[in-house]
Amino acid sequence: MMKTKPFFSIKSVMESPLAEKAPHNERIAAYCLLVLALLLKVAAVFLYYIDSDEPQHLHIVWGWAHGFLQYRDFFDNHAPLFHILCVPLLKVFGENTHTLFAMRLAMVPLYFAVLWCTYVLGREVFSERCGLWAAAFTGLCPYYFLDSIEYRPDSLWAVFWLLAILALIKGGLRASRGFWVGFLLGAALGVSIKTTFLIFSLGAGTMAMIIFSKAFHIVRPAFRRLINYGLALAAGLCVIPGALILCFYTQGALAPFFYQTIQYNMITGLGLWDSPYKQMFVFTVLLALLFGIAGLIGRHTVQEGMRSKRIIIFLMCGLYFSALIAFCPLMEAEHFFPFYPLFFILFTPLAWKLRVRPLPGWAAAALILFLEISILAWAGHFTFAHVKIGLLKDVLRLTGETDFVADLKGETIFRPRASYYVLEEITRTRFKRGLLQDDIPERLIATRTCVATLDDHCFPSRARAFLNENYIPVGSLRVAGKMLPALSGSSRFIFFDIKIPTEYVLISENGLATGWMDGAPYDGGVLFLRAGYHEFRPVAPTARFAVVWAKAKQKGYYPSSFFDTIK
């Protein structure tokens, strides 16, 4: 009896029809998809919503450009290389409401660099045809496409990591090649501390590759060459991190550098760290599964060189994903940037094998791409990009270069922040546990901060109460001031407290207020109010009154509750 060939097996995937060269019509289709991706990308730069991390990163670049030192002069829990490299771009684009869009455009070449690396890796591991479709799948993958629009270090991080893998699998055990592999890994580490997960996956994957590729008889005679390669890799790995450490050491900022990039992010019970034993169990199970599949890949790949490459790509992809979900406390979409290209390189031959009959492989790929584009259109938060740009426009209009502002994470970008810590999840957790002291009210008073962003639950409770009491909404912002209480009983005086000493004006719902301020006649002009209690006796006691930062009034900003009646 004739044996039927099984529809799916590891061997059948390893012998996928993708091993052939891409036909001309497929190449044309792939190029058209890349052009489509470019057009969608450029349009999305101006339409896709602005994530809170983007202004934060640009604020760090602004700090470097103005002579401030990251970690010492302002807080940040990211590695510094990306921000340093972006300083020349900020100098070129200038400080205006369109700068963030220009910085987003600078991410587009990095997006295509990732696709190019995906193509070359796919070609090296399977075939040119596989690399072509893997690049198309990666480029239009909704999660990667949308998140890579944003201005963030992870796009550059993914490029350095993929280039390091390319240098690893395309070269032999030459020491010079090992140095450049290490140098690229060091560059990735200078961009993101998450590179430690990638280095772990690379090391474990390399060891497993040696085992499963049955290469012991090759490695043993070349043991000295392997040691030299490892030493050169380690030397290259130290170049950029060593230069950064030396830079902060000479500036007396080494302690805050290590604290904010490493210690600050390590807090027990945060996110996935609330059940470490469960996570360790999950990681162990995934590890056993990955090594089992790696053994099958090694057994069913005939060519020795191809076998090693496939094993190491598979294990780096799987080990990174497993380590991330087991040991990273907060899961963010950008953490998966290095994962998507490797995943689609492995997924493409599998998709070709598991195609829906009687569809040919190219039609199945087209169906997958159609689904990706459909999800992209459905999931994208478009037309929201200009909301935060309006905030930035108001900040630039109301404040000067040296004026402090109160915000959450640096969303006002081109102004110094009154508070030191950025108010993201780790900081908020530290505030709740009493590991950090909420000194924001004192900082607002000391810096005479007159502009703040609108109320948000992310402000610590003490700071939030202070801001709500001493700042008044004027559209997209709050400025120093407050609504005055109504006259009560037979009293003809309104008493109020000022915490931020600066110049104010009093206004009523009908325009300027007149009367007596602290016993002196007041005709609606600008006056300096010191910190403490004040009294106002209005001429028209039935009106509603507010005390507002004088500059806001001069620029045409009025309390939101007065807007309709005054304007």
Image (spheres, helix red, strand yellow):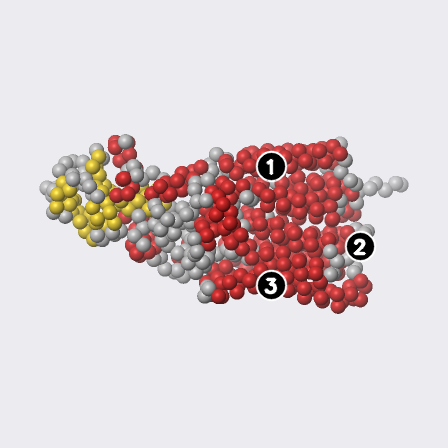
In primary-sequence order, the first of circles 2 and 3 is 3
Type of the residue with mark 1: Leu
> Quick check: 555 above or below 314?
above
Which residue appears at 41% of the width and 47% of the height? 414
In primary-sequence order, the first of circles 3 and 1 is 1
Q: CA distance from mark 3 to mark 1?
A: 36 Å
Q: CA distance from mark 2 to mark 1?
A: 38 Å
Quarter holding the N terminus is: top right
Q: Is residue 334 left or right of residue 354?
A: left
Percent across and percent down for residue 559 are 28, 39
Q: Badge 1 is on which residue? A: 38
Of all residues, the one furthest to the front in this rendering is 92
Q: Is residue 312 left or right of residue 434?
A: right
Q: Nearer the viewer, mark 2 or mark 1?
A: 1
Provide the secondary structure element on which disc 3 rests: helix
Q: Badge 3 is on which residue? A: 238
Q: Label 3: few (<14), some or many (≥20) within 10 Å? A: some
Which residue appears at 69% of the width and 57% of the height? 205
Percent across and percent down for residue 349 are 73, 43
